[in-house]
Image: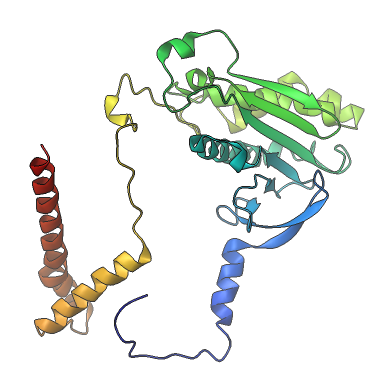
Amino acid sequence: MDDGIPFVLYISDDYARYVRKEMNIKTDIHSVYIPFKNAYVDVMLMHEMDFPFYAPVYYPHNTEFLIESYSIPIWLYSKHLEEYSNHSFRKLVIEMLDNLAYWIVELKPSIEKYLNTKSVSEYLLIEVLFDEKVDWNNLRSNDLQSNGDAFSLTINQPHNLTLFFGKRLNKILATSDNSGEREIISTLLKNLSQFFNNEQLKQEFSENKIDEIINKHMPLGKKKKMGVYDTSKIPELNPLEITKPRVIDEIDTNLLLDELGQYIVGNNLTIGNDREDHYNFIKNHKLPFFLAKLTNELKNMINTFFSTI
């Protein structure tokens, strides 16, 4: 992507085997069967290997997300993202699926004995839906105080349950602790027993047991995954009038490094060989170069701002 003429040509005799191996480990791309669609799809890790949560690879608007850490597949699902006309809903849906997956994986040491092939038939599907009449980016205080549930849960036997989130969701998540998340996950667990085939496990998975699990893995306090902020109290957090940032691309970094290279060559600078030489080069030349560029950029932004007033 650089404009400069390449001066090194490297041919790998093993077809970049180690790079491909590293990529395979980091992405873990593989095919899985989607039982509720009777189809196969390629999935890849959304995070790290120690968090086995997978997303579709080639269909970015599909919402079949998979947790693979249990002996049965646990699917988190919503409508096809293109069916949400409001684009902000798409981000909201993905964030909620990711948050639910985090807590389900966190609870594994205590609930994996209940979610296995002997107690649950084939798979478990958790569908997530939001009230599309709500402007989730601009909720008013009277919306939060209105009647209605923050969320509701519906069982669809034999595999499915649906979580529907209403506009009061922000109210239970806006606390300084994780009480809102505890309420959501506790309700989810209390309905899981309806999918159990084993009567003994049904009786064992009592409300007292669930409360014990919640207190162990989600103790009331600051261990919080979902955060909501009230912009009426902190107006600086209101994103409605902020210009969307442009993400820095790799080409931007490469162009900047090219400028640095021209600066080094043009001034006949030498980097040195040992650690101290490298440190002095960064302090005396590289850092001042980038600070000067940043200062010029800020001056141009300030001049442009005042010229428009």
Front-lying residue, 14 or 240: 240
Front-lying residue, 118 or 157: 157
Position above or below: 211 against 7: above
**Which quadrant of the structure image shows residue 262?**
bottom left
- Number of labels in the image equals 0
**Which quadrant of the structure image shows residue 26?**
bottom right
**Which quadrant of the structure image shows residue 260?**
bottom left
Q: Residue 309 vs residue 205: left or right? A: left
Q: Is residue 144 in view from this perspective?
A: yes
The percent position of residue 294, horizontal first and vertical second, equals 15, 57
Q: Considering the image in quadrants, where does the N terminus appear?
A: bottom left
Q: Residue 144 vs residue 213: left or right? A: left
Position above or below: 55 against 165: below
The percent position of residue 299, horizontal first and vertical second, equals 9, 52
Q: Is residue 209 in view from this perspective?
A: no
Q: What's the residue at 61%, 30% (across, down)? A: 216
Q: Indicate the colouring scheme.
A: rainbow
Q: What's the residue at 14%, 73% (across, down)? A: 280
The percent position of residue 124, horizontal first and vertical second, equals 78, 38
Front-lying residue, 119 or 128: 128
The percent position of residue 94, horizontal first and vertical second, equals 56, 41
Position above or below: 262 against 100: below
Q: Residue 133 vs residue 159: left or right? A: left
Front-lying residue, 79 or 176: 79
Q: What's the residue at 90%, 32% (across, down)? A: 197
Q: Considering the image in quadrants, where does the C terminus appear?
A: top left
